[in-house]
Image (spheres, grey):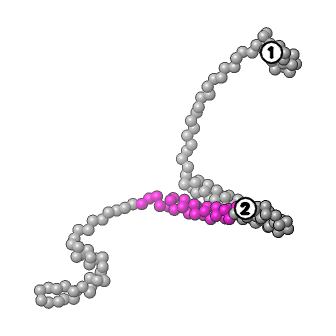
Amino acid sequence: MNEEFAHIESVLGVGATADQAEPPVVCLPIPVVRIESPPLSEEYLARDLKHDYETVRKNLRELVEMGKNALDGVLAVAQEGDSPRAYEVAAQMIKTLSDTNKDLLEMHGRINTIRKTETTTNNTTNNSIYVGSTRDLQDIINSARSTQKVFVDEDETKSV
């Protein structure tokens, strides 16, 4: 302890004197308890996705509307003052508004992508084996052609 500041420390009550030594503070480790969350249901996830979609859409639409109003004001100031800086601000605001509109459209695309991935998760492929000749298989596949097909048998021509 510095003796120059002893009087100030005693008045403020921040310094410790030799007879008032405090015991050292011992920090004990805090046990970490791992909490397992239950699996989320599809209904909950769908409801949560819909809520987030509506919130984001509402916020982006409000930003677009506020941006339009602000742009009108900035353009009015730019026209009155003929200041290059005012026109630069207006140009930046137009760019920001167009980016916000793009974000709104991209959000729709992302939602559609999420919905498509949710619906196309179970694909079952059953392999079938055809036992027969290639001629029979082509007759089955192209039945219109097989009715007009002409077979040559020795010297006679038949229509089947």
Residue flagged by tag 1: what amino acid is it?
Asn
Q: Residue at x 56, y 43 (%)?
A: 37
- Image coordinates of residue 60 in percent, x first then y, are 69, 61
> The magenta stretch spans which residues?
96-123
Whether residue 70 is visible, yes or no, is: no
Residue 64 to residue 136: above or below? above
Considering the numbered disc 2 on the image, is that residue within a helix, a strand or a loop?
Answer: helix
**How far apart are the alpha carbons under marks 1 and 2?**
59 Å
- Image coordinates of residue 111 in percent, x first then y, are 58, 61
Instruction: Give the mark nearer the N terminus: 1 vs 2.
Output: 1
Q: Residues within 10 Å of mark 2 (few under 14, many from 20)?
A: few
Asked whether, in this view, residue 145 is left or right of residue 44, the answer is left
Q: Which mark is residue 2?
A: 1
Q: Nearer the viewer, residue 99 or 12?
A: 99
- Image coordinates of residue 45 in percent, x first then y, are 58, 54
| Quarter holding residue 85 | bottom right
Look at the image and tell me in which quarter the N terminus lies. Answer: top right
